[in-house]
Image (spheres, helix red, strand yellow):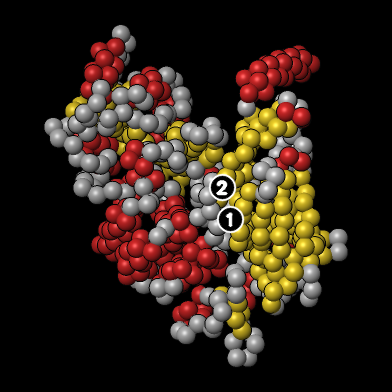
Amino acid sequence: MTTTPDAPDVTITVIVYNDAERLPRAVASLLRQTHPNIEIVISDDHSTDGTPRVARELATRDDRITYLRLPQNSGGCSAPRNRAIDIARAPFLMFLDSDDELPERAVELLLAAHAETEVDFVMGAVERVRVDTGRTSTWMPHLVAERRTVAGIEAEPGLFFEHLSTSKMYRKSFLDRHNLRFPEGIHYEDQLFSAQAYCLAKAFTVIPEPVYRWYIEPYGAAEAASISNQRHKLSNVRDRVYVQGLIDAFLVDSGHASVREAKDYKFLKHDFRMYAGDLPFRDDDWLRGFATIVNPYLAGLAPGAYERLPRAERVVLQLVRDGRLADAQVAARGLGHGVGPRETSLDAEGRRLYWGGTVPDSPAARRELDLTELGLDSRPFPGAQFRHEITRLDRSPEGAGLALRIRTYDPGLRLPVGPQVASLVVAPGRRRMTTRFRLDPVRPGVFEGEVTLDLTQARLPADGFSGTRHPLIQLTEGHLRNSGLLLAPLSFPHLKARVPYRSGTAPHMVEAEPEGRGAGRLQLRWAPVGVLAHVVRPVVRRVVGARVRRSARLAASVFR
């Protein structure tokens, strides 16, 4: 059993609810801290699984751990954090969720920054880890790239984007002086708490080192998903908008109205943008409910916040505000991908180009749906914005191919009149598979063609290929090439075929489906089966892995 001095330097609160499996991992990350003089409070929101037993066992093993159990479930993160703040003994506080971890030097780094400069809190980088892929990235990297001390949020209002409470170490006297606690009974409490902390702090320090490890499980079971991953619920939208209203009121009451535009921009660019990407996958009732919730709030945001957005995002916002929800779904499929609209319209003078088949009625809609700045008819061909959609998809008669009918929209009229030669390109492994086909003109700016993708012709690596690919459509203009997404019908059936590559010695299961998020691209997934999957690939990986390790050791010896 570990013993430490009576007065801890930092109290770290681990909030937990029905997470007996992951709680030990979170606590273990605290016990590994290079600065050991800490107090750990496990604050349990009245779990009904094995969490109480696991928490008590952890507390018996180390004197630094205290187990706190709320008498009833609060349904959120705020109450368990607040109860822990009330009993914290250290002058500095941190917060950890039970499904996340702290990097080993987190406490040491944040505490050292507090020692260097008298500030109200210190914040660091957050390392995001995708549970499904293991890939890591940094949350809002541009905000934490440089070490600095900020003299109040007015100096850097862009930091509103970093609204996590868990990436920071707070001076307890700062929280107590302002009676700053997490708002109970609402979700997205971090956003309000962090906005208040930013505004109330006279100074805070930013360090670039990672101080929090955030595990992201974007496709977990809906009922077990985090609040942020429950965007499919209209109550989630309502909670998020409600919190924004509380932040707005606080900015006014605390004398920080000058940062309102920056905060509004953050809402449009981050909060609304997440819902916008999901719009193509929502039904009519959800869309109507969504518009009813967000439109009153959108109407009161600073005009300057809209003006800072990319044009594609402004288009989706305006279509939602105008109640053109089916059109908003069409526009949302191009967000972040440079996908053109299906139709555009010119004003009476032929000068301004607008999204959609008719010129918008209101001045506001004309301002927001104006695509003139995109130069659809003049931008370099590799960056031209086309739109490629599958209008029909069937299994080919041979059974190991896909028969596609594709419609290409050319809103800038970049393609010459007449048939076009296009290519369907997909690269399983490192080898590209190109299938050429013809696009025939249907009317100005619209082409259609049919192509069969023969999956048996894919040249896979010798040890097979396991992975997902999204086919592209390529068009050419002289020596220039344009590659664009291939959007799939979101309702088409999941197709699956066993393909006997290499005369049957390298069989794979290949699946075709629409991507269930984002633009909704056509998605192909290869998975080796049989002896290839269970014998050949494991052997190849062991051999290759051993060679890589030997090469690494050799390289290291050279530079000693």
What secondary structure is found at the residue carrying circle 1? loop
Q: Residue at x 38, y 20 (%)?
A: 28
Q: Is residue 388 left or right of residue 290?
A: right
Q: Residues within 10 Å of mark 1 (few under 14, many from 20)?
A: many
* Residue at image mark 1: 488
Asked whether residue 481 is in view, the answer is yes
Q: Eyeballing the image, is 500 above or below 186? A: above
The amino acid type, in three-letter code, at marker 1 is Ala
User: Disc 2 to disc 1, how far (Cα)?
Assistant: 8 Å
Which disc number belongs to residue 305? none
Foreground residue, 397 or 114?
397
Extreme residue toward the left, this view: 71
Q: Position of residue 242 (x, y in %)?
A: 28, 58
Q: Is residue 321 left or right of residue 353?
A: left
Q: Residue at x 68, y 16 (%)?
A: 539
* Residue at image mark 2: 513
Q: Position of residue 169 (x, y in %)?
A: 37, 36
Asked whether residue 155 is in view, the answer is no
- Label 2 vs 1, first from the N-terminus: 1
Extreme residue toward the front, this view: 397
> In the rendered image, which quarter is residue 88 located in?
top left
The amino acid type, in three-letter code, at marker 2 is Glu
